[in-house]
């Protein structure tokens, strides 16, 4: 994500990261998981043509049956219309004037392949939050680490 700082400056976006202390590792392909996060962050930057704030928060979550790492990417961009939310993960669907419409479809597939989830909530003219959840690598060697 250090590479994203340069991109943020190019887009006049303030970029904040907060990683919970002692965050457990997740099992998966580091390159693919990085691809998901970079895609989400780049989309956030493009949603803020006049600049804004992009915040990434990584934290540990547990309940009685699941243990996961949650990464939330929130922007203060233009938001996504309600009628577009349900189509975001469809291949070739895009609301941008340029682009292929494949980024979020690929991200969705990668998350499925890793036993994780990806969810989007948005308020038009206020911003968007994308939440990625990945299962913790219980009893496994460290495969993917979230950098701060």
Image (cartoon, rainbow, N blue to C red):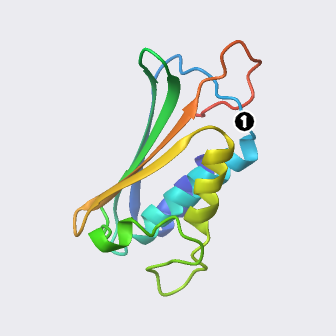
User: Where is residue 60 drawn, in percent x and y?
Assistant: 47, 24
Q: Does residue 67 appear to the left or right of 30 in the view shown?
A: left
Q: Position of residue 18 (x, y in %)?
A: 43, 34
Q: Is the residue 19 above or below the residue 46 in the image?
A: above
Secondary element at tag 1: loop
Q: In which quadrant of the rendered view does residue 20 lie?
A: top left
Q: Residue at x 60, y 66 (%)?
A: 103
Which residue is under mark 1? 28
Q: Horizontal placement of 79 versus 105: left or right?
A: left
Q: Residue at x 66, y 51 (%)?
A: 110
Quarter of the image that includes the C terminus: top right
Inspect this view and state whether residue 44 appears: yes
- x, y percent for residue 7: 54, 62
Seen from the viewer's position, the closer of residues 21 and 27 is: 27
Q: Residue at x 46, y 67 (%)?
A: 88
Q: Is residue 48 visible?
A: no
> Percent x, y for residue 16?
41, 45
């Amino acid at each position: 994500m250090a590479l994203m700082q340069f991109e943020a400056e190019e887009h006049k976006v303030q970029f904040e990261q907060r990683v919970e202390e002692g965050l457990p590792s997740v099992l998966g392909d580091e390159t693919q998981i990085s691809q998901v996060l970079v895609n989400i962050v780049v989309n956030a930057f493009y949603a803020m043509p006049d600049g804004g704030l992009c915040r990434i928060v990584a934290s540990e979550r547990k309940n009685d049956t699941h243990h996961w790492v949650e990464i939330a990417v929130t922007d203060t961009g233009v938001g996504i219309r309600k009628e577009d939310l349900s189509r975001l993960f469809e291949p070739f669907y895009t609301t941008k004037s340029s682009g292929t419409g494949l980024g979020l479809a690929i991200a969705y597939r990668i998350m499925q392949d890793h036993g994780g989830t990806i969810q989007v909530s948005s308020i038009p003219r206020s911003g968007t939050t994308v939440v990625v959840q990945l299962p913790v690598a219980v009893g496994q060697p460290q495969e993917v680490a979230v950098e701060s």
